[in-house]
């Protein structure tokens, strides 16, 4: 069953060991669909997700919210070893920018 207004995050990639494409959904990491073509892998995983969502709804379970519709604050914490923290702080100071700006620039590359 295909979902109407499907907003889940799908990915298709080649799997060398299986010599097939696999369709994946970020919001349902335990689900996958193997197929000979990328189009069939995407179609297959979308069908499986639709079936799982319908089953979850029928059983009163919480359905994952699509990543594309979530609101993000733009803030998250990253823990690094003290020597990495020191190195980044030094690099930021030498560049004349805040540590936050330096980290953001490095992460966005």
Image: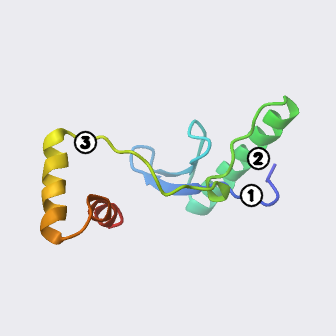
Left or right of 94? Residue 10 is: right
Earlier sequence position, callout 3 versus callout 2:
2
Estimate how packed mark 1 is, as few (under 14), some (14 to 19) or many (20 or more) residues with alpha carbons within 10 Å. Answer: few
Residue indicated by mark 1: 6
Estimate how packed mark 2 is, as few (under 14), some (14 to 19) or many (20 or more) residues with alpha carbons within 10 Å. Answer: some
Tag 3–tag 2 contact (CB < 8 Å): no
Left or right of 91? Residue 72 is: right
Mark 2 or 1, closer to the camera: 1
Residue plotted at (84% across, 28% down):
59
Image mark count: 3
Residue indicated by mark 3: 80
Earlier sequence position, callout 3 versus callout 1:
1
Name the residue nearer the viewer: 68 or 57: 68
As helix, strand or loop, the secondary structure at mark 1 comes to loop
Residue indicated by mark 2: 50
Residue 2 at x, y percent in the picture? 79, 53
């Amino acid at each position: 069953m295909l979902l109407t207004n499907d907003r889940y995050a799908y990915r298709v990639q080649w799997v060398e060991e299986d010599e097939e494409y696999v369709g994946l959904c970020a919001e349902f990491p335990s689900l996958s669909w193997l197929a000979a073509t990328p189009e069939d892998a995407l179609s297959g995983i979308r069908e499986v997700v639709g079936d799982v969502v319908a089953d979850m709804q029928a059983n009163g379970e919480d359905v994952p919210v699509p990543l594309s519709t979530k609101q993000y604050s733009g803030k998250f914490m990253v823990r690094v070893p003290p020597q990495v923290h020191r190195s980044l702080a030094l690099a930021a100071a030498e560049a004349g920018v805040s540590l936050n700006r330096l980290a953001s620039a490095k992460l966005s590359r």
